[in-house]
Image (spheres, grey):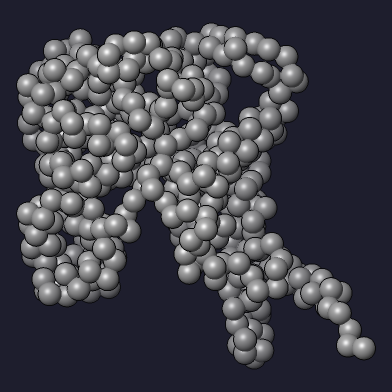
């Protein structure tokens, strides 16, 4: 059962197709429900309980574990239908996360059964983000990770439904190493052809080398990155040493008591709320409301920057979610503060949708105000009045007006000298 916004009780999985979620011993511990109509959220899981934790379990692992051990490899897909379709086609070593980005706990569980994984996720932007996130989490468990590339517009369910195991076999056979898949995509964009893009290419490649806990894999990755970028091994190793692999811990963020230096700087000295904090929350509400807004927000150019640390963490987790994932429940890998934000904004977003709030009409304005907030932050960091004056001249009219209001508010709160 679940409580509606108006306080009444309703069946949690009303009008949904149910998928039993089982623990490693095959006992049912929860359910995943898929809407039979076009309503949101499309997928909904059972709430967290003493026996059910989404971030520590995987769909179908109870049935696939013997095949995974036998094959010494597993196939990771996005959702329930993908798993069922592959099993029907005779591919038994297949599992899926429970509507969340892959967590370190799930990766550690998979490593108990096999040393290698093939990632078979969508090839669109959201799918690639989920692929590289999952791959780097698995690399931290010293697993070998390959990526299978689906034809554009296809997913494992539709492809296998049309062509059976024969359609999928060559795709799995041709899977390439995680780092090589990144290199393929960067080469297609021409990022290795000019000096201006090579720094950006390195920023994409180095996290994969940094995540590799196996020293041999890490050494091979460094050699490969040096080969494609023309940067010497010595420089690459120096760069990796400056930010060790321990910095990449998606399931173990720093506790609130040990605030990072960049987060300390993000808090204005004046004690006012950070510019844009409220609008950042509104952006997250939109992302909770629909996979379309998650996709659009994650793909904005230039990328959107959130400055509230917990909001930034929730934004990254939402951006990494597959389109089929539900967002009403908790997600693995978040800090305690970010988990609280997740639950609070998920609830407020659901209430606004129920009240008929039109995110379609508001989204462009939300993004515009986020850009204005970014300009305000930049202005606050400028100490030279002349430089600030020139910056204001090139800013938008709305930004100049907001800056004037902030200055007036600051003057009103100053305590006069006696």
Q: Residue at x 12, y 18 (%)?
A: 67
Residue 85 rendering spot, x and y as whole percentages: 25, 14
Up-down relation of residue 189 to residue 413 (above or below)? above
Q: Residue at x 68, y 12 (%)?
A: 9
Q: Residue at x 54, y 51 (%)?
A: 310
Up-down relation of residue 117 to residue 275 (above or below)? above
* Quadrant housing the N terminus: top right
Rendering quarter of residue 191: bottom left
Q: 400 and 118: which one is in front?
A: 118
Q: Is residue 384 left or right of residue 137?
A: right
Up-down relation of residue 309 to residue 167 (above or below)? below
* Quadrant housing the C terminus: bottom right
Residue 169 rendering spot, x and y as whole percentages: 9, 24
Q: 157 and 50: which one is in front?
A: 50
Residue 370 rendering spot, x and y as whole percentages: 60, 58
Q: Residue at x 7, y 54 (%)?
A: 216
Q: 226 and 415: which one is in front?
A: 415
Rendering quarter of residue 106: top left
**In this orientation, does residue 25 appear?**
yes
Residue 173 rendering spot, x and y as whole percentages: 7, 31
Number of numbered discs present?
0
**In this orientation, does residue 163 appear?**
no
């Amino acid at each position: 059962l679940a409580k509606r916004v108006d306080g009444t009780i309703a069946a949690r999985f009303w009008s949904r197709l149910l998928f039993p979620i089982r623990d490693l011993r095959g006992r049912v511990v929860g359910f995943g429900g898929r809407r039979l109509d076009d309503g949101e959220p499309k997928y909904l899981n059972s709430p967290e309980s003493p026996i059910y934790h989404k971030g520590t379990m995987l769909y179908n692992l109870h049935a696939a574990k013997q095949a995974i051990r036998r094959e010494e490899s597993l196939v990771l897909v996005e959702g329930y239908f993908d798993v069922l379709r592959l099993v029907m086609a005779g591919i038994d070593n297949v599992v899926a996360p429970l509507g969340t980005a892959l967590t370190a706990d799930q990766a550690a569980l998979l490593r108990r059964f096999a040393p290698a994984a093939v990632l078979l996720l969508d090839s669109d932007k959201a799918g690639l983000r989920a692929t590289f996130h999952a791959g780097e989490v698995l690399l931290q468990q010293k697993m070998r990770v390959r990526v299978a590339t689906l034809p554009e517009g296809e997913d494992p369910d539709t492809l296998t439904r049309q062509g059976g195991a024969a359609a999928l076999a060559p795709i799995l056979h041709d899977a390439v190493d995680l780092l090589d898949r990144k290199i393929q995509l960067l080469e297609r964009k021409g990022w290795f052809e000019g000096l201006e893009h090579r720094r950006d290419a390195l920023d994409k490649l180095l996290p994969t080398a940094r995540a590799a806990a196996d020293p041999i894999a890490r050494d091979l990755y460094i050699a490969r990155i040096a080969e494609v970028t023309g940067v010497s091994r010595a420089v690459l190793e120096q760069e990796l040493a400056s930010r060790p692999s321990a910095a990449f811990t998606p399931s173990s963020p720093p506790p609130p008591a040990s605030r990072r230096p960049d987060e300390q700087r993000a808090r204005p000295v004046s004690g006012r709320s950070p510019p844009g904090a409220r609008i950042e929350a509104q952006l997250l509400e939109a992302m909770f409301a629909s996979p379309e807004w998650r996709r659009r927000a994650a793909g904005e150019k230039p990328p959107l920057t959130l400055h509230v640390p917990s909001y930034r963490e929730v934004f990254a987790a939402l951006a990494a979610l597959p389109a089929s994932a539900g967002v009403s429940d908790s997600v693995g890998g978040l800090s305690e503060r970010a988990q609280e934000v997740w639950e609070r904004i998920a609830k407020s977003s659901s209430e606004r949708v129920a009240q008929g709030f039109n995110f379609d009409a508001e989204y462009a304005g939300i993004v515009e105000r986020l850009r204005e907030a970014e300009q305000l932050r930049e202005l606050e960091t400028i100490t030279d009045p002349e430089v600030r004056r020139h910056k204001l001249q090139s800013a938008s009219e709305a930004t100049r007006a907001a800056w004037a209001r902030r200055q007036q508010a600051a003057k009103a709160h100053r305590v006069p000298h006696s």
